[in-house]
Image (spheres, rainbow, N blue to C red):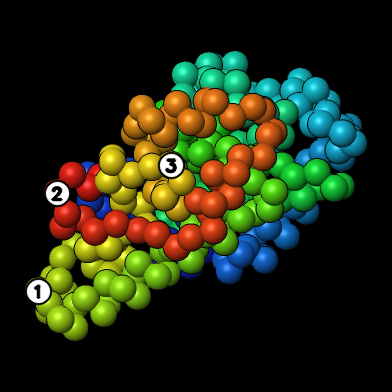
Amino acid sequence: MPSLQVPRQVCESKRTRHTVRCCIGEPNTASVVRLQSERFRTYLANAGGSSTGHSFKATTNNVAAPTTSSPFRSLTATQEMTANRVYGDSLDYSTIFISDTAGLGGRPFTLAVEVSGIYIQILNCGTFWPGEKTLIHELAHAWQSQHHPARTKFMVNAVSCQAEAAKTNVAAAMIDPALLVETDFPLFYPYDAYAYHPSQYFVTMAAEQMASAIENEEPAIVAHIKSVAKNAMDPLCLLALNQVNFADHRIAGVKG
């Protein structure tokens, strides 16, 4: 299946120390969201399912078996068990699907799309069997969608933070030209939307910082996400995704 084209500023770096680098779609995702929404509606119709209420999983589970050629599938029991270790009971799996579509360069990205008045979260991982780190990272965006009143806010925030970090890196290179030879300049070095410091509070983390911290299973961050009830709005998530934030890899202790 061909990859969807997404902005270069959200592409993965090759540095192995990085956490998962996912791609968010085009400026808030107009064409990518439209395409995936249409594909999901077609899939649901072919599966004989209904998008009335929170019944997606119940109506598509059998059709979406891993041996089928369906473009969307529910998480398997094993994937849910993996997720539960980190997210507890805070995720509503009935609206979460995995797609074998991938972003530029085969990179994963997560979208929240509205279907018949209900938002679903699609983890576009390029495979139905993503690695554990990729699964946990992309589910962080599903969590953000399910616990924020604006279901697509995480996408807006992720793109904004990545673009601002790249802009800040270019400005930094005007002062320190040595930055120009760094492998990850200007997308992820020295400033990086995925980078965070373990001492940061949940409320200070923007979308990708939060996903990186959850992927790394930072105790305080994981404790918070587990404490939020399924589908409940989280005031701290609202505040967190209302800021543009990134961290400097040159600072001791910064991860990402």
Residue located beneath label 3 in the image: 202
Q: Which residue is mark 2?
A: 252
Q: Kindly indicate the quadrant of the structure image that contains residue 90.
A: top right
Please state which of the two labelled residues, at mark 1 or mark 2, is closer to the viewer.
Answer: 2
- Residue 150 lies, in percent from the top left, at 68, 53
Q: CA distance from mark 3 to mark 2?
A: 19 Å
> Do the numbered discs 3 and 2 sit on residues whose CB atoms are within 8 Å?
no
Q: Position of residue 179 (x, y in %)?
A: 15, 71
Residue 71 in sight here: no
For badge 2, the amino acid type reads Ala
- Mark 2 lies on a secondary structure that is loop
Residue at 60% x, 21% y: name it.
89
* Relative horizontal placement of residue 170, taking residue 164 as reference (left or right): left
Secondary structure type for disc 3: helix
133 sits to left or right of 25: left
Note whether 163 is above or below 216 in the view shown.
Answer: below
The residue drawn where x is 52% and y is 25% is 226
Rendered position, 92 above or below 161: above
Q: Amino acid at mark 1?
A: Ala
* Left or right side of 66 for 86: left
- Element marked by disc 1: helix
Residue 141's place in the image compared with 247, above or below, is: above
Mark 1 or 3: the one toward you: 3
Residues 236 and 74: in front is: 236
Q: Position of residue 55 (x, y in %)?
A: 83, 29
Sort mark 2 into few (<14), some (14-19) or many (20+) by Cα contacts within 10 Å. few
For disc 1, the marked residue is 178
Measuring from the top left, give residue 135's x and y in whole percent. 48, 33
